[in-house]
Image (cartoon, rainbow, N blue to C red):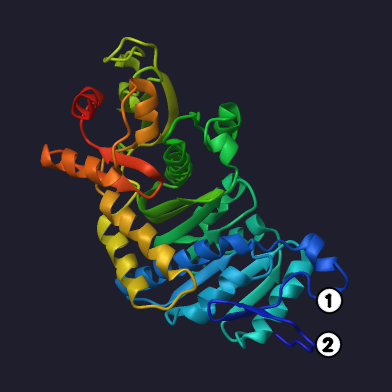
Amino acid sequence: MTMQIKVPLKVSSEGKVKILLPDNNVLGEDRARKIVFYNIHMAFSRDFSICVLKAYAKLSNKKLRIAEPLTASGIRGLRYAKEIEEVHEVLLSDVNPIAVELAEINAFLNRLEDKVIIKCSDANMILSMHATKDKRFDVVDIDPFGSPAPYIDSALRSTLIGGIIAVTATDMPPLCGVYPEVALKKYGGLSLKTEYCHEIAIRLVLGLLCREAGKYDLSIKPLIAHSTRHYIRVYAQLVSYKRTENIGFIYHCYKCLHRETVKIDEVSSCGLLCENCGTPMRLAGPLWIGPIFDKEFCREVLATLNSMTLPHKKPLRRTLSLIVSEADGPPTYYTIDSLSRIYKIRQPKMQDLIQKLQSEGFNASPTHFNPKGFRFNGKITELTRLLA
């Protein structure tokens, strides 16, 4: 890569990377700002990704080849190359030639020409060019504006078995039950508007990954996921196919908040009436009903964070600590305000509630999804009895 820049550059920093922002006049007045997307609010997500991939590199004991085919300004992929010593090569690509030009400048600014390959290409096309066994990547990072669904198939085909697929989704209204028919069209499952809708969103994305991997006699193992601001983010390991019982449905009762997960081969024998109050239940899915966290991996990510210096270290530690605490909890969570609204009870302090539930022998923990949310492995009748 050869880059000659003849105008003064104004750069900002994120992590250890110098970044030329899209509004700099090196690309012409307002030219890049209107066309190249850069979201400062995703810095937390990028910090999170650094920790995850560094932990994965340590556990797998290998040098990483990474693909980021929707790179825009290049910031995420360049941070991988700059901040993770175990990264051997990063392929950055974008269909927008102005984005590619900006990414090239940013790679030059950070002296990453030897580690970073930059292409101007459609995301699915370039991933498909790396679908043969000798060309696949250890990590494929899909970070689109909107739904990741159009890129899942090519991402799976270009990932090594044992590698990681990282996926961002920002189309939260469909995923969170506002437009369930859109979720069905894009993700193959109905969403549901509930207090734990962001977890349902993650499970819909994982369900799509699992079903698409199944076409190639492969499956997935979710490692870690988070819901932050306007997006969700999942990290799943691609694994050899094994019989899975992790695709099914979530049934939810809006009247009493009872919920249950049902395996897909049990749906026909499961009644749609709530076992607690007899009200017709609504369903979400098909989606992933298995674990969405691998606790040991989550612990390794937290340990990795503690050994690093990152711009968002404090909120990252808080989020990762909550994830570790909830990692082996049951599917779905309750929120204090929804319980208070339905059952007309006074809202207890979260810490007091968790301690009370644990003292009664239940598995209870707060959740990173919602500051008023908690996981609880008992029935709604047991919960309301303890809250009365």
Marks 2 and 1 in Cβ contact (< 8 Å)? yes
Q: Residue at x 72, y 80 (%)?
A: 105
Give the label on residue 197, or none. none
User: x, y percentage for residue 333?
Assistant: 34, 37
Task: Name the element at disc 2.
Answer: loop
Judging depth in this view, the residue of 70 and 387 nearest the camera is 387
Q: How many neighbours does mark 1 have within 10 angstroms: few (below 14), some (14-19), or many (20 or more)?
A: some
Identity of the amino acid at label 1?
Asn
Judging depth in this view, the residue of 108 and 343 nearest the camera is 343
Residue pointed to by mark 1: 25
Task: Name the element at disc 1.
Answer: helix
Q: How many marks?
A: 2
Q: Quadrant of the N terminus?
A: bottom right
Q: Position of 59 compared to 312: left or right?
A: left
The answer, for residue 131, to whether it is visible in the render is no
The answer, for residue 206, to whether it is visible in the render is yes
Q: How many neighbours does mark 2 have within 10 angstroms: few (below 14), some (14-19), or many (20 or more)?
A: few
Residue pointed to by mark 2: 7
Identity of the amino acid at label 2?
Val
Q: Quadrant of residue 254?
A: top left
Judging depth in this view, the residue of 277 and 71 nearest the camera is 277
User: x, y percentage for residue 136?
Assistant: 50, 65
In the rendered image, the vertical position of residue 369 relative to residue 35, given as above or below: above
In the rendered image, the vertical position of residue 231 relative to residue 257, given as above or below: below
Farthest front residue? 346
Q: CA distance from mark 2 to mark 1?
A: 9 Å
Q: Residue at x 59, y 86 (%)?
A: 114
